[in-house]
Amino acid sequence: MKKILLLLTFSFIFSAATSSLAQITRPLIIDHQCTKLQQIPAEWIDSAKSKLHIAYGHTSHGSQLTTGMTGLVSFAGSQYEWNNGGSGGALDLHDRGISGASDLGNPNRTAWADATRNYLNNSSYSDVNVIIWSWCGQVSSATEVDINTYLSLMNQLEIDFPNVMFVYMTGHLDGTGLSGNLHLRNEQIRNYCSDNDKILYDFADIEAWDPDLNYFGDKIPNDNCDYDTDGNGSRDGNWAIEWQNAHTEGVDWYDCPSAHSQPLNANQKAYAAWWLWASLAGWTPLTNISDNERTAPKNFVLEQNYPNPFNPTTTIKYEVPSNLAFGQAGVKSESSNVKITVYNIIGNELAVLVDQQKSPGTYEVVFNSDGLSSGVYFYKLTAGNYTQSRKMILLK
């Protein structure tokens, strides 16, 4: 089996010369791919606890992160302790400590920004270097203008407080499916974060997948993890309960409070939260389906396929820069042999879409999924020492 190195949907660099925290230079997207707690090195858990001072504003739905994190301590050990102040070597997390607003939509859609500004201007909280707010249903009724307001306010806070990392968030699932307003507004948030190198905790995406990477987003799922099993428009299954029943409590999952939902959902939210904390501390995570390859130079681009999810075809766009230096012995060249391949989730090569010399320019190639089943696939561009991979979702 051919092996490849798959970068996750985010990347960043760590700079000890400034604040000793991660310096975000690419989108940092925390989604269902970031729920494998065992992949986070213990030293980066410790690093997060020593470096981060987090303030988190939320109401009931957002509490899934913190109740999941609390339950995780009994399940996985004291290394995952957290409290307000970071006493005893725990993670310093000021839970619901920002007065003046309850969440991103309560009491209105802008109060949280003023509350954040007042909080950060208070010398008592001068050590805080991470701000995260959650929604509690308000994305479902949001307009495009409402979300633009949210994004604009977040961006202005980033400008005004450059030493603080601000975490964006999508809204929880509401059962309206891929054609509903919630999905459109969540996509608006995702696209903005991807295009502008932001930090995103993708609350909704985490709710759309079980731990075995079975996708439920096309089955009108809601925040309780209910979904439509047979396509008749009625939610008659629950992926979290089904997974819990098929696995061992205390071994594969743990019981904990999970507002409006099931324990497994809060488990996943907690795992993703620790992935976020470790990443903000400087950890550069990789998904290892491969060996020995380098990350992409900044002037070479492999874009996200569109549409995504797709059926049966999708378009992949890529750019070949000028002044390439990928030839043998580092000799510069104005063209390079470009190869684009498609892999399944275990690393098996399924198709070669491009394998030829390319001059500088922008190109597109269409991938046809005939003969493949629904699921997660990866596509990879290789040109000399350069490589980049992305995820795509086939829904049939």
Image: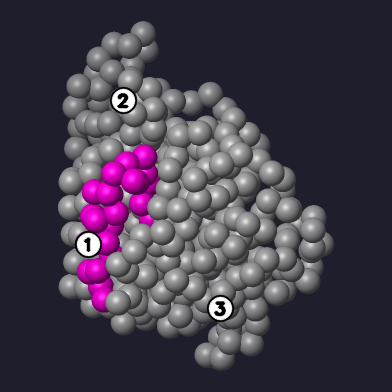
The quarter of the image holding the N terminus is: top right
Q: Which residue is mark 2?
A: 18
Question: Is any atom of residue 225 visible in this view?
Answer: no
* Quadrant in which residue 339 is drawn: top left
Q: Decide if residue 275 is on the left or right side of residue 25.
A: right
Mark 3 or mark 1: name the one nearer the start of the chain.
Answer: 1
Q: Is residue 100 left or right of residue 351?
A: left
Q: Amino acid at mark 1?
A: Asp
Amino acid tagged 2: Thr
In the rendered image, residue 22, in percent from the top left (x then y), is placed at 38, 34
The residues bearing labels 3 and 1 have C-alpha atoms spaced at a distance of 28 Å
Is residue 163 rendered to the left or right of residue 278?
Answer: left
Query: On the image, numbered disc 3 is attached to which residue?
Result: 260
Instruction: Give the crowd class for mark 1: few <14, some 14-19, many >=20 residues within 10 Å.
Output: some
Instruction: Kindly identify which numbered label has been placed on residue 283.
Output: none
In contact (CB < 8 Å): disc 3 and disc 1? no
Residue 110 screen position, x and y as percent: 22, 69
Residue that appears at 48% across and 82% down: 175
Which amino acid type is shown beneath numbered disc 3? His
> What segment is highlighted magenta in the picture?
108-132
Q: Residue furthest top?
A: 329
Asked if residue 75 lies in the magenta stretch, the reply is no
- Toward the front, the furthest residue is 124
Residue nearest the observer in this picture, 258 or 325: 258
Residue 391: percent from the left, percent from the top? 46, 51
Badge 3 element: loop
For the point 44% across and 40% down, the residue is 52
- Residue that badge 1 annotates: 114
